[in-house]
Amino acid sequence: MNAYADITDLPNHIIPPVERHTRKTNRDDLVLFAFAAALIAIVALGTLAFGPVMLGMTALVFVPVMMGLIVMITLG
């Protein structure tokens, strides 16, 4: 056995057990996803209806709101 041995070549007592970190999607996650989808849809429809100039105007409101949400989510 050399330094480049495959992990399957090692004896069983050397291989540590693999833990699975699974996280189920809960109601809060679904609400957050729906809110994000609604914001994206509002911006997309507004751009389609009013043109690219309104996209810039939307960004004046959209960016600070999203930054605030990111800060609140990060702080928990």
Image: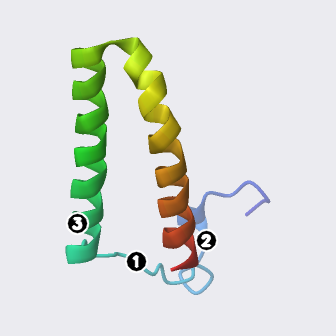
Horizontal side, residue 57 vs residue 38: left or right: right
Residue that label 1 marks:
20
* Nearest-to-viewer mark from 1 and 3: 3
Horizontal side, residue 45 vs residue 18: left or right: left
- Residue 52 in the image: state x and y as whole percent: 39, 13
Vertically, is 17 above or below 73?
below
Q: Amino acid at mark 3?
A: Val
Between disc 1 and disc 3, whose residue precedes? 1
Q: CA distance from mark 2 to mark 1?
A: 21 Å
* Nearest-to-viewer mark from 2 and 1: 1
Residue at the outermost bottom position: 13
Q: Secondary structure at mark 3?
A: helix
Q: Amino acid at mark 1?
A: Arg
Q: CA distance from mark 2 to mark 3?
A: 46 Å
Vertically, is 11 above or below 39?
below
The residue nearer to you, when weighing 58 against 32, is 58
Residue that label 2 marks:
10
> Label 1 crowding class (10 Å Cα cut-off): few <14, some 14-19, many 20+?
few
- Residue 38 in the image: state x and y as whole percent: 22, 46
The residue nearer to you, when weighing 19 against 10, is 19
- Residue 57 in the image: state x and y as whole percent: 46, 28
Q: Secondary structure at mark 2?
A: loop
Residue that label 3 marks:
31
Residue drawn where x is 40% and y is 77% of the image: 20
